[in-house]
Image: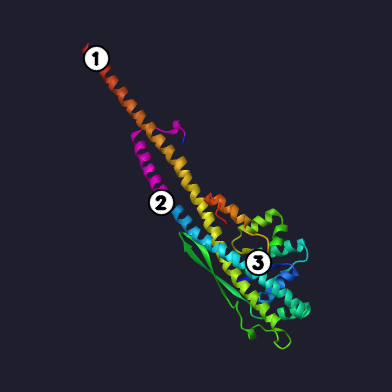
């Protein structure tokens, strides 16, 4: 399986340098969403890497879908603090806020 | 279970007693499973926190490096170099079993590459580019690890939640209802016995008179 990267042009170019083929440079939000749907339907993608900022801009519904998706697993990176939804999930499942 | 549905018979009582025993056994097992899952989850949680931090650090570094090579090499030659990288990192996912939860074990191949394997010309590019490629390769490494751990965590959380629901349903709903039904049948049977006794006494009194 492969890794896919979606994001702005600057974000993805470095991953191309690391050899990842499935990079999608999205210019605007519509493209972003189109690429995401394309990747979600691709059975060959095991991990999807996205910029945190792009993730925040997506509709909440799509964010939830991505966060709960296991195949591909979505990893967001960026300056902003990630894992807010993970915190909610932990709270709901375990009953205690264990994140941080 | 509504009280009217219960037939106060001895066979029903035996049935319900059997059901109670079964539910209690299931309840104990599920409770142990829940505790085990939570213990397992604690281990994964620590790891997840560590990898998150590492990922963040590596991303910072990689971003600095790409900005640097953008400045030194120029956007066009950076892109040219990037598109000439041939080897694609591959990941393979193997299922692993943690307390009955199937979690993926992701292994990656060909993420780290030697200088010569990268595919761009060494003469036309500066060492900064190599450093950048290095930084991104190690970032990808972290991403793969982090993906494995986060998927594991999601699956464990789902399983914990459903197990907890089952435990609670058994503890607060199924078992109390069954015990209530059992008590009802017992009372009813006793009552019937007393009625029968009383009736017998009445008949005896009448025949004696």
Q: What is the crowding at mark 2: few (fewer than 14 residues within 10 Å), some, or many (at least 20)? A: few
Distance from Cα at disc 1 to Cα at disc 2: 57 Å
- How far across and how far down the image is residue A10, in percent? 74, 71
Q: Which residue is mark 3?
A: A49
- How far across and how far down the image is residue A62, in percent? 68, 56
Disc 1 secondary structure class: helix
On screen, residue B28 above or below B68: above
Q: Which residues are magenta?
A: B2-28
Magenta region, main secondary structure: helix
Quadrant housing residue B137 = bottom right
Q: Nearer the viewer, residue B65 or A64?
A: B65
Q: Residue drawn at (64%, 86%), measured in percent from left and top?
A: B116
Q: Which residue is mark 1?
A: B205
**Chain for mark 2?**
B
Quadrant housing residue A57 = bottom right
Please indicate whether residue B99 sits to the left or right of residue B203 in the image: right
Instruction: State yes or no: residue B15 in magenta.
Output: yes
Instruction: State yes or no: residue A60 in magenta.
Output: no
- How far across and how far down the image is residue B172, in percent? 46, 41
Tell me whether marks 3 and 2 sit on the same chain: no
Distance from Cα at disc 1 to Cα at disc 3: 91 Å
On screen, residue B68 above or below B201: below
Q: Residue drawn at (41%, 51%), measured in percent from left and top?
A: B29
Distance from Cα at disc 3 to Cα at disc 2: 39 Å
Closest to the camera, between mark 3 and mark 2, is 3
In the rendered structure, are the residues bearing label 1 and label 3 in contact, judged by CB atoms less than 8 Å apart?
A: no
In the rendered structure, are the residues bearing label 3 and label 2 in contact, judged by CB atoms less than 8 Å apart?
A: no
Q: Which residue is mark 2?
A: B29
């Amino acid at each position: 399986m492969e890794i896919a990267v979606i994001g702005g042009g600057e974000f993805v170019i470095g991953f191309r340098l690391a050899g990842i083929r499935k990079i999608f440079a999205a210019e605007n939000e519509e493209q972003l969403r189109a690429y995401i749907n394309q990747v979600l339907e691709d059975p060959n993608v095991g991990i999807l890497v996205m910029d945190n900022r792009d993730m925040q801009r997506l509709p909440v519904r799509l964010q939830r879908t991505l966060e709960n998706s296991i195949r591909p697993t979505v990893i967001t990176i960026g300056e902003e603090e990630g894992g807010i939804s993970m915190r909610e999930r932990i709270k709901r499942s375990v009953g205690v806020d264990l994140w941080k | 279970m509504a009280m009217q549905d219960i037939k106060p018979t001895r066979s029903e009582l035996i049935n319900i007693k059997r059901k109670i025993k079964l539910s209690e056994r299931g309840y104990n097992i599920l409770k142990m499973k829940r505790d085990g899952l939570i213990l397992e989850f604690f281990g994964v949680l620590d790891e997840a926190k560590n990898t998150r931090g590492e990922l963040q650090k590596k991303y910072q570094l990689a971003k600095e490096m790409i900005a640097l090579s953008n400045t030194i090499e120029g956007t066009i030659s950076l892109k040219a170099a990037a598109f000439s990288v041939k080897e694609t990192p591959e990941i393979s996912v193997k299922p692993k079993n943690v307390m009955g939860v199937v979690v993926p074990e992701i292994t990656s191949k060909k993420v780290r590459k030697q200088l010569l394997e990268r595919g761009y010309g060494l003469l036309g590019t500066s060492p900064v580019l190599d450093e950048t490629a290095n930084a991104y390769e190690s970032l990808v490494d972290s991403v793969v690890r982090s993906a494995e751990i986060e998927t594991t965590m999601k699956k464990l959380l789902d399983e914990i939640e459903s197990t907890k629901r089952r435990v609670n349903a058994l503890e607060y709903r199924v078992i109390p209802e069954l015990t209530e039904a059992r008590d009802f049948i017992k009372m009813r049977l006793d009552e019937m016995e007393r009625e029968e006794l009383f009736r017998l006494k009445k008949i005896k009194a009448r025949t004696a008179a």
